[in-house]
Amino acid sequence: MSTFDAAVPAAQPSLAARFRLPTGPIQFLGFDKDYWQLWIRGSALLALTLGIYRFWLTTDTRRFLWSNTEMLGEPLEYTGTARELLIGFLIAVAILIPFYALIFLLALTQGLIGQLAGVIGFALATVLGHYAVFRARRYRLTRTVYRGVRFHQTGSAWYYAIMAVLWWTVVILTLGLAYPIALSRLERFKMRNTWLGNLQGRFEGSAAGLFIRGLFMWLVVVGPLIASLVAFVLALDTALLRELISTNDDDALSRLIEAHPSVAFASAFGIGALIWAALAGMLLYPVFQAMVLRWWASGLRFGDMAASSTLRTGEVYGTYLRYIGWSMVFSTIASFVLILLGAAGAASLWATGVLDKEWFSSVGEIATAILGVIIYVAFALGYAAIYQVKVRLGLWRAVANSAGLSNPATLGTISSVGAPASPVGEGLADALNVGGF
Amino acid sequence: MTTSGQATYFDGVTSARHDVTVTLGASALQIHASDGHMLAEWPYAELEPIASPQGLLRVGRIDNPVLARLDVRDSTLAAAIDDLSVPIDRSGRTERRGRRKVVFWSLAATVSLLLVAIFGVPEIAGRLTPLVPYAAEVRLGAAVDAQVRSMLDKSGAGPRFVCGSGEVEQAGRAAFDKMFAKLEQAAGQPIPLRVLVVRSEDANAVTLPGGTIYVFHGLIDKAENADEVAGVIAHELGHVAHRDGTRTVLQHGAMSLLFGLLLGDFVGGGAVIIAAKTILQTSYSRDVETSADAYAVDLMKALGADPRALGTILTRVAGSSHSPLKLLLDHPETKERVDAINARSGAGSAEPILTPSEWTDVRRICSESKG
């Protein structure tokens, strides 16, 4: 009686044909128009409610993305609610207030502990942030349902947090060279603890593969920086170093550079390398992101199912170019509207003679500040909405539509396991400002 | 009216697809497998609409721990279920009503939060400040001092940042201390006060919690006589007497808690918090400054010095300041302050607080600045 049909169900082909969709096993069916509507309305409400609406906006966004993503003709389902996120956030606030109070007290203590309070606070917040990321992932997975079966996540969030902090420290110390191994280790831990019902996930992306593919890009961006560092070290002999340490005012450095042209050369080289790293990093970022996304999607496994990805670098460039184009159009139109409104406002103030009034100086100052905030928020939310539609939705769609899946028949043989998890992690992640979907 | 149709059913136990026939009964819909066997019966009142792409009606059962799902792609059957079931509402009216409630109460919360921030927080901080023990204030001052010192001492002069230790400077320090001793005695504060002249070009002075006053040598450069400097110090003593530093810290803390923690952050949220604080603080500080001015006038009168000198130096400093936002708005404010100072000073003769030769010494208190 339970029939499984690996091909798309009867009504599906026409739907797919109507929207000229790719015919892969995973398809994204949502329209930009609906997502625009969601985010324009959501942004306005975010501003009006000083951000309280974000729980509803986040839930709506996830519901839209999940429910429009179909695997083998069956859409995913997001069962989380805004109310849960709100409660999770309130719990997180209850946990974090004593934490902040403690750091504040530490900062008031005299001596070493007082001076280190900022560092201690930052370290604790970093560990807590990674802890929150893992717990939030658990919440999202247990709210994700496919064919009546829930995803869930096992594993200790503290273990993950400590592992993540250690790996990221290594990444920073190796100037990014350890990024592939760190990413693959963390992803392996996450996927090993990810379950769809009774089907365990794993991650098989190879760190060496990502390393080899990314090495050239790393050399292009970071290489000159390292070369300039080496040049600087070579230019410094011990006598010079002693001179540098013994003098500590501003003029000393410029005198030093005058006396030793090799130092001047190394400094100029260093500045050039920094500018180069920023420019090249920006231009190559979509290539890097496409590479990592492709590597990540191709490494995902569930039981005997293996995902693959044919995501093209050009698609990722396209999303960013569209984002930049839309942002420029938005900036132009918004600035034009702003100038018109400003001129109209100034004219009406002048015409009514308010400008000459005594009280205007103090009221005017506050009004200017409030207007400034409103304009800033309007612009920030405008860019955020464009980013959501063009980059986030664009990438989601590109990754989904470019995905392949081997042994899809396994999807029909999974049994339900797992219960919904608490939203505290989401709340912590929200309060600590560590994102994710 | 349609009474039955084809659909897909997932029983929530396994991920297997079931092609089913849905029959619409009087109060419930029945789900039959292709062999006629009944898989489930769901009352219309317990149906739960679930987000799905266009062209698909996905139904679950409210509060069901088992995630059984019925996917209906047949549009006439979907419309019939929508008609029969109250919770299923594809027009989105119920959803919108719920949303409106959220928006309304969020707005109400925003308004009450702003009211508390504008009227409540200063009031609470004002009431709490006298209750803070002086020992705590001194300790707070020590913690803030290191921070402020490193922010002011931009060139990294270290201990040499404070004037008055050099050979040429010592006479100036002695004269300055004499003037400050007079002011401190007249002020009669319960905590020991400390005043430091520092190598900073700004014409300004800063008071920290716990009775530490920084006078920038830029102020002494701008002053034309000792009474002007004394007037500014008397104004700072007003801040000490009113414990304004402690109150500001309490206000800042309460505000960060209100805006930062309860609201979290969204795009631009950080800027809103900062701007809100600035707006509120400029309006606090206006009152605070006025009362410190009044204190300074009374103190200078008690010493027999010139209470109008504070107004004179205020006008001179404001005339040359270049704060971009306040450029236009500062002048009337300064004028109001000076008018208030002069009104409170009244008529009467004054005795200079230092002799001309002592004042010449004070002007040299930072003379070794670039040595």
Image (cartoon, coloured by chain):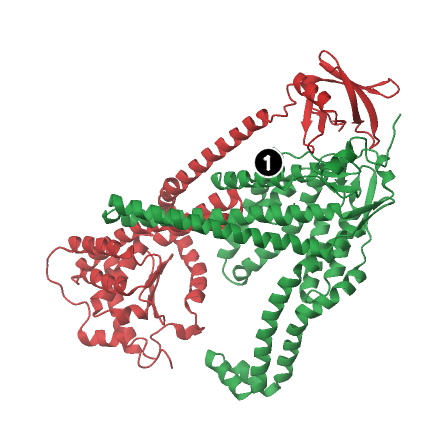
Q: Farthest residue to the top: give it.
A: B26
Q: Quadrant of the N terminus of chain A?
A: top right
Toward which corner of the image does residue A174 lie, by quadrant?
A: bottom right
Residue B304 position (above or below residue A327): below
Instruction: Tell me, yes or no, if residue B252 can be seen here.
Output: no
- The amino acid pointed to by label 1 is Ile
Q: Is residue B306 left or right of residue A254?
A: left
Q: Is residue A301 left or right of residue B175?
A: right
Q: Quadrant of the C terminus of chain A?
A: top right
Q: Position of residue B196 (x, y in %)?
A: 34, 68
Instruction: Tell me, yes or no, if residue B275 can be seen here.
Output: yes
* Numbered circles on residues, count: 1
Q: Position of residue B180 (x, y in %)?
A: 27, 66
| Nearer-the-camera pick, A340 or A73 | A340
Q: Report crowding for label 1: few under 14, some 14 to 19, many 20 or more residues within 10 A (C-alpha).
A: some
Residue A267 position (above or below residue B122): below
Q: Position of residue A224 (x, y in %)?
A: 65, 74
Q: State the residue at coordinates (49%, 85%).
A: A255
Q: Colour of chain B?
A: red
Q: Position of residue B124 (x, y in %)?
A: 38, 42
Which type of secondary structure does the marked residue at label 1 adopt? helix
Q: Farthest residue to the left: give it.
A: B348
Residue B136 position (above or below residue A60): below
Q: Is residue B322 left or right of residue A421?
A: left
Q: Is residue B191 left or right of residue A422?
A: left
Please, which chain is the residue tagged with disc 1 on? A
Q: State the residue at coordinates (57%, 55%).
A: A121
Q: Which residue is mark 1?
A: A87
Q: State the residue at coordinates (27%, 72%).
A: B221
| Nearer-the-camera pick, A115 or B290 | B290
Q: Colour of chain A?
A: green
